[in-house]
Image (cartoon, helix red, strand yellow):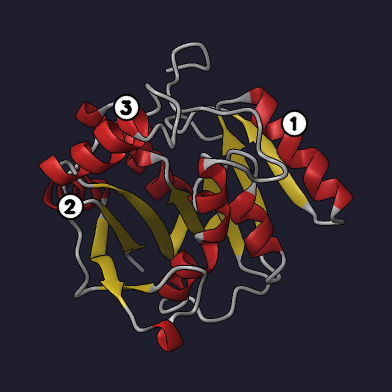
Amino acid sequence: MDQNTFRGGSITWWPPSGDHVFLYKANPLRFDYFDRFIENWKDVKVLDVGCGGGYACEFLARRGAVVFGTDIMEESLHEAANHAANENLKIEYDLCTAERLPFSDQTMDAVTCVDVLEHIPDKDQTISEIYRVLKPGGWFFFDTFNKTFWSRLFIIWLGEVLIRFMPRGTHYWTFFIRPDDLKLLLEKAGFTTVEFAGIKFTRCGQKKSDFPVAISPKGKTAIIYFGAARKTI
């Protein structure tokens, strides 16, 4: 898979607009859940696979992590690097596919992959690469779309066709994946601890982000779900 065949890519990220506003503002929500596994990100070596314009990378860098980002879109990385430089954030960006990461074995403490797996046809190879670059005991954090009627209705039919919140053709429903199927791929790669979580609506006074929801293992996973997987120590 190369840049010419990739679907769902974008080269305009800063300032966030359109559907990118959601991607940008979702980071506090995501990391409120990921923080359950890594409470302090200072000096943690993190790779963000499919980093786009660097939203998650910058979020992590501001928390003291040592951050690397990879993406298949050269224009996105150029914009990400320029914005990081303007913000005085030290982030290393590399152009590559998710299926072949330019890092040595066991070099990362954590890998994040948010809003990306639903765009990748070869998830098996991608997860194997993520496992390879993780140190023993390292964590893989992700979110992606479930392969259900509801995800097809809300993400593609409503989001892309009727409301046009996203450009048409951004997603292929055939690339979406059910949690049970993703768990099989994770376990095949060698991950031994796997947890999934979904969306749980909260009262206004309880929310920790711009959205009135929280991520919980007891939440709904019919459309989108989140997860954490740990490499064997």
Taking 101 as reference, is 177 left or right? Answer: left
Taking 187 as reference, is 39 left or right? Answer: right
Residue highlighted by disc 2:
179
Q: Residue furthest top?
A: 4
Residue at position x 52%, y 35% in the image: 101
Q: Residue furthest front?
A: 162
Q: Which amino acid, by three-letter code, is at mark 3?
A: Val
Specify the label residue 13 is tagged with. Answer: none
Specify the label residue 78 is tagged with. Answer: 1
Mark 2 vs mark 1, CA separation in Å: 33 Å
Specify the label residue 161 is tagged with. Answer: 3
Q: Which amino acid, by three-letter code, is at mark 2?
A: Pro
Q: Pointers 1 and 3 in contact (CB under 8 A)?
A: no
In the rendered image, the quadrant that contains the N terminus is: top left
Label 2 residue SS: helix
Whichever of labels 3 and 2 marks the residue nearer the N terminus, that label is 3
Q: Which amino acid, by three-letter code, is at mark 1?
A: His
Label 3 residue SS: helix
Above or below 52: residue 139: below
Mark 1 vs mark 3, CA separation in Å: 30 Å
| Front residue (pair 200, 203) | 203
Taking 122 as reference, is 77 left or right? Answer: right
Please identify, in this view, whether the residue under mark 3 or under mark 2 is nearer the observer.
3
Q: Residue furthest bottom?
A: 205
Label 1 residue SS: helix
